[in-house]
Amino acid sequence: ALKILYQDRGKFDVSILNQFSEALHIFPPSAVVTANDGRKAIVIDADPYIPHLPWLMFIDDASLAQIPNDLSLKVKSMVEYPA
């Protein structure tokens, strides 16, 4: 459903779509997000049972992190979702 909203992003305010996704804590694969440490990352995978704890690949150094394994890390905001 979120992918359809982003595909029709011309009909919606993208900042509101991003806030909606953040409120639900759903960060789909390929979404660009900002972590609470300020680094930008790409969501590479998310467990359907815990979508608010995705796997991230940080853009600055291509390092990987899985939020369930590093609870000090959180997704702060969604920057972009190239649906």
Image (cartoon, rainbow, N blue to C red):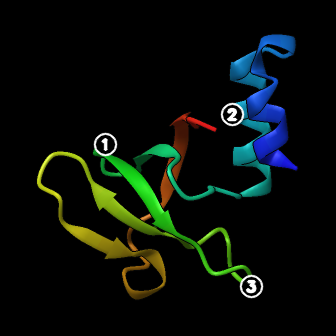
For badge 1, the amino acid type reads Gly
Q: Residues within 10 Å of mark 2 (few under 14, many from 20)?
A: many
Report the residue at 53% width, 46% height from top: 31
Q: Nearer the viewer, residue 18 or 29?
A: 29
Q: In 3D space, how far apart are the residues under numbered discs 1 and 3 (Cα atoms)?
A: 26 Å
Residue 49 — which label?
Answer: 3
Q: Nearer the viewer, residue 30 or 14?
A: 30
Q: Quadrant of residue 18?
A: top right
Which of pointers 3 and 2 lies earlier in the amino acid sequence? 2
Q: Nearer the viewer, residue 51 or 76?
A: 51
Asked whether the residues under the numbered discs 1 and 3 touch, taking CB atoms below 8 Å apart as contact, a structural biologist would say no
Residue 34 lies, in percent from the top left, at 42, 43
Q: Which residue is mark 1?
A: 38
For badge 3, the amino acid type reads Tyr
For badge 2, the amino acid type reads Asn
Q: What secondary structure is marked by label 1? A: loop
Which of pointers 2 and 1 lies earlier in the amino acid sequence? 2
Report the residue at 58% width, 37% height from top: 81
Q: Nearer the viewer, mark 1 or mark 3?
A: 3
Q: Which residue is mark 2?
A: 18
Judge whether 78 appears above or below 75 on screen. above
Report the residue at 84% width, 34% height from top: 5
Q: Nearer the viewer, residue 47 or 3?
A: 3
Report the residue at 26% width, 71% height from top: 64
Asked whether the residues under the numbered discs 2 and 1 touch, taking CB atoms below 8 Å apart as contact, a structural biologist would say no
Q: In 3D space, how far apart are the residues under numbered discs 2 and 1 (Cα atoms)?
A: 17 Å
Q: In 3D space, how far apart are the residues under numbered discs 3 and 2 (Cα atoms)?
A: 21 Å
Q: Quadrant of the C terminus?
A: top right
Q: What secondary structure is marked by label 2? A: helix
Q: Quadrant of residue 39?
A: top left
